[in-house]
Image: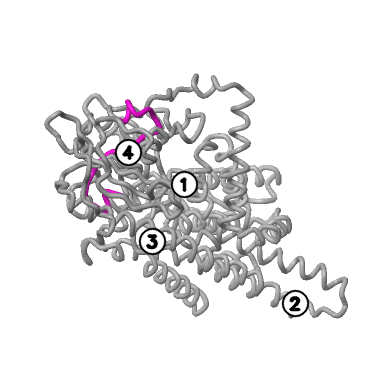
Amino acid sequence: MRTPLALYLLALVGRLVLIWLHPDPAYPDSAYYADVARSLAEARGFSVDFVWIFAEVGGRIPADPVLPIPSNAHWMPLASIVQVPFLTIFGMNPVAAAVPFALSGALAAPLAWAIGREAGASRVVSVGAGILTAFPALSFPFMVQTDNFSLYQPLVAGALFLGARGLKGHARSFALGGLLVGLATLARNDGVLAGGVLALAFLWDRWRAWRSSGSRRPAIPVWSAVACAGLFVAVMAPWVARQLVVFGSISPSSASGKVLFIRSIEEWNQITSPATLDHLLGMGLGPLLLTRVGGLVAAVGIFTTLVGAGLLVPPMLIGALRRRRSVDFGPFFGYAAALFAFSAIVSAIHVPGGTFIHSAVALVPHGYVLALEGTAVGVAWIAARRRTWNREDATHVFSGATVAIGIVAALVGTVVVDADWNEKRQARLTLAAALDIAGAAADDRLLTIDAAGYRYLTGRGGVVTTNDSIETQREIATAYRTAWLVLERDEIATSMAPVLRGDSRPSWIGAPVFTIPGTDGGPPRIALYPICLSDADRRCSVVATADFRDVTP
């Protein structure tokens, strides 16, 4: 037990360092989960007082545009639920929210070791895969975000591992796989892909036994498959019931059409574009196929970069070729094929926006075992042709180099990503302080590109700016009675860009009361504007305002 424990502690320490470097949510997904967790911990239930994307409220401005609204019309709840006990015990602080993700995500490292050991890999491969999984290349910085990365990864990889054990005759392992698939689906909808893989594994086992004309008995008994499905249903049933009661749909955001029937990622954040099958097909067969191919290419590129760090992919493919008929990797290959196919056919538009990597991290433990096995295969091939090479020593050296590539990528990626995240966080905290100085009330609502992120940092709810016309932005502001507009140079709705540049500004948006200038002489990095929706609001008639540029949070 010393080796898996050591790997777990190594992974845990690395993740605790990540929390120290950047404890707060860094992007809308993680901020959303953190906001919902706080709502649960404060006994407000599954609700949020902001609209982060209009797909959560039907894809349009609702007939009754109220806040708060029921949460999780798009995202699953587990990433919020796991934070609640820690927030309740240790208080509403970012470290308490991030710790459960460190604890759960660190399980992936000893799991990689167990996968290698179960498959008969060498100690070098098994331990090396565990170390690589502890620091998973350029995806490492995301491993303690209050998101589903550190939940989904060990749950799906664990389910695939148990499925493979089921095919080798371990009936209880296969049954337990259903529990992990259920939890994975509570973390992310894509978990059902792993469930489909386990179902196919059962059918393949039956088909193989049938083909043998009685000489081979099925490895997975019927009771095991029933228990697997039953555990999945037991885990999912309460959440499905909640969705049906609250929204009348298992997947409300998909029901609006905004998830499946958009032509580009820009339409995901629009309320004026159609969201129907006719709209999608109306783009023509050629452009439609190009979007599907683009989704697949983007998925391959994201996996190669964030998981494979480029250099790990060739040995991973060699290892996959060597293990192509291995029962130990059969469910893994099935999930990988299903994930890439799903990304190309169904969610192609969303892949470049980050949806793919959330699911692809589940490929890490098995993938790194294959990468190190591929490294060993390559060394053996060269050693057979170079008599001066000692095969065992060379395997150790090149395996160490493979692990080093992943760790260096993780360290470099963390430094670069955290620097960007911390700079963005500091700018938003400064703006939050400027809001208070400008006289914003505690319940004033904000119109921003990241309503979840600003709710987390400022405590103020609000609505997202969309990729629609400036007239539509006013309709949104009026419907939800927003009082302030926040614009950021790096993330901005198209119609708001002229406002930030100072080229044009409608009368309902006042002069900026706070800006952080751009370092290149271009538009400000971030700016705060009053929104005036009635003649009684005189803030937009002010020409000169106080200079808040030196304000500190």
Kind of residue sitting beneath label 1: Gly
Q: Secondary structure at mark 2?
A: helix
39, above or below 53, in the image? below
Q: Position of residue 305 (x, y in %)?
A: 59, 55
Q: Secondary structure at mark 4?
A: strand
N-term-proximal mark, 3 vs 4 = 3
Mark 1–mark 4 distance (CA, rounded to whole Å): 28 Å
Q: Position of residue 134 (x, y in %)?
A: 51, 68
Q: Residues within 10 Å of mark 1 (few under 14, many from 20)?
A: many
| 86 vs 425, nearest the viewer | 425
Q: Which residue lies under the disc numbered 3?
A: 422
Q: Residues within 10 Å of mark 2 (few under 14, many from 20)?
A: some
Where is residue 293, by image quadrant?
top right
Name the mark on residue 464. Answer: 4
| 99 vs 170, nearest the viewer | 99
Q: Which residue lies under the disc numbered 2?
A: 394
Kind of residue sitting beneath label 4: Val
Closer mark to the observer between disc 2 and disc 3:
3
Kind of residue sitting beneath label 3: Asn
Q: Which residue lies under the disc numbered 1?
A: 191
In the visual, does 177 lie left or right of 432?
right
Closer mark to the observer between disc 1 and disc 4:
4
Determine whether label 1 and label 2 are within 8 Å by CB: no
- The residue stretch that appears in magenta: 454-473
Q: Position of residue 405 (x, y in %)?
A: 62, 68
Q: Residue placed at 50% from the left, 19% from the top?
A: 278
Q: Position of residue 493 (x, y in %)?
A: 40, 37
Determine whether label 2 and label 3 are within 8 Å by CB: no
